[in-house]
Amino acid sequence: MTEIIKLTAARTAEKIASGELTAVEVTEAHLARIDAVDEKVHAFLHVDREGALAQARAVDAKRAAGEKLGPLAGVPLALKDIFTTEGIPTTVGSKILEGWIPPYDATLTKRLKAADIVILGKTNMDEFAMGSSTENSAYGPTGNPWDLTRIPGGSGGGSSAALASYEAPLAIGTDTGGSIRQPAAVTGTVGVKPTYGAVSRYGMVAFSSSLDQGGPCARTVLDAALLHEVIAGHDPLDSTSIDAPVPPVVEAARNGSVEGMRVGVVQQFRGEGYQAGVLQRFDESVELLKKLGAEIVELDCPSFDLALSAYYLIAPSECSSNLARFDAMRYGLRVGDDGTKSAEDVTALTREAGFGDEVKRRIILGTYALSSGYYDAYYGSAQKVRTLITRDFEKAFEQVDVIVSPTTPTTAFPIGERADDPMAMYLADLCTIPTNMAGNAAMSLPCGLAPEDGMPVGLQIIAPALKDDRLYKVGAAVEAAFVEKWGHHLLEEAPSL
């Protein structure tokens, strides 16, 4: 089992295609791993054992019949519990949708199934993707496999923890303000936020519609690229979907090089609040890029300092609108419907029981920001700042091909440390939020361990919209150089569960 679960997704697929392994063997190995460690990690909210084995048997039948298999056929995947899945629960980490069984698949779910990827189950997350630690899940926190007393990032901590604990070689996350990249950084894995609109949001439960973006999570850059190619592409069911070809991400991941590229370093992405070990590993990464043939360009993007404030007006405003649909009348939880209460009372009682503290906090903040007399002062002003951030990126990308930064200001913090301090929690997304505001593409990959605590540090790479292949080109080059330097992949240093 250990040999199977340690394989990359690309290598697993090759072994299944050649007949060296069956998809059922691979699936059973990962289900056994989940049985062995997930009680401690709590990466999964729901494991679809029967469904996963049925998908695996179908892959083996295709191979036996001589049918050509896709590049990830038979490879298991952990799916963030924000995408609808026909016949199995989708809770979004919330009590308000506890036990809800969707009647349809999200477009992303359909594409995974069409590619013969085996969906193991649904992963834990901050409720409605609101959080940076997965502590806001109504079903309890997830532990970081490097140190179970620390957070695995958020909101997609279940997906990142599943990868780092070898419960799945692939995972799906969503990124509204950093919820793919930040978990990847603190668990020593790879996470990619594609260009906004590159991956369909149809069937993805909405938090902040102008910011939300699904994307691939994996243990290597190539595995992430292979998954990216499966899930990306135009979807007529999503009005924000981009009708453009998917960039050549797999080719870029297989031929990574930074020779002759201009790499930007933004002065706003360092300073007060950054852990010394994080900056040390980032500076080493910049030196590595120089040695690999990149030209380093210093950049000044003043509006980035305003990104956090603007984000925490735009995202709550959109969430207060999106979550209005959870009214106890159509689906999900219903509380107080005893025949004596009005519809308004039932709605109020249901929301009180069904939503957690962070979700309520953001709904209240967003409703206030959108209210009459305050709209222009708050939401309208935040959208103007968003335009300034986009312009800063445009100016930067006239000078450079990609931008690099630390992914997070600190390594994973202890569970509970920031639970009573929302502002400290929000600062975890300091480096990732500007990219969501502008709709650009970004990746996080491991760049070493912080000397203070031995926890993983992430390097963020940012590319212009629709230039996602640049992420994989640079990411593959950096990954190969680090693996050569360390003699192994970073995750091999993680303590065994």
Image: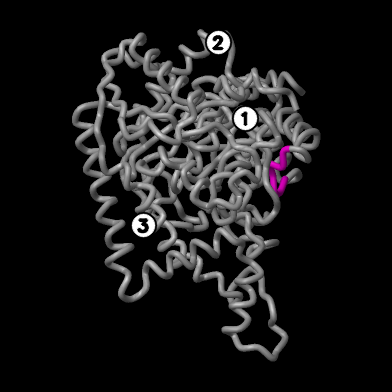
Task: Give the magenta part as a residue range.
Answer: 41-47
Report the disc number at residue 6: none
Of marks 3 and 2, the one in the foreground: 2
Mark 1 → mark 2, Cα distance in angstroms? 21 Å
Q: Which residue is mark 2?
A: 486
Circle 1 — which element? loop
Of marks 1 and 3, the one in the foreground: 1
Q: Which residue is mark 3?
A: 239
Of marks 1 and 2, the one in the foreground: 2
Identified by mark 3, the residue type is Ser
Circle 2 — which element? helix
> Is residue 412 visible to us here?
yes
Q: Earlier in the sequence, mark 1 or mark 3?
A: 1
Residues at discs 3 and 2 in contact (Cβ within 8 Å): no
Mark 2 crowdedness (10 Å alpha carbons): few <14, some 14-19, many ≥20: few
Q: Give the quadrant of residue 189.
A: top right
Q: Residue at x 38, y 67 (%)?
A: 369
Q: Residue at x 39, y 17 (%)?
A: 256
Q: Which residue is mark 1?
A: 169
Q: How many marks?
A: 3
Q: Nearer the viewer, residue 122 or 416?
A: 416
Circle 3 — which element? loop
Image-based side of 191 in relation to 296, left or right:
right
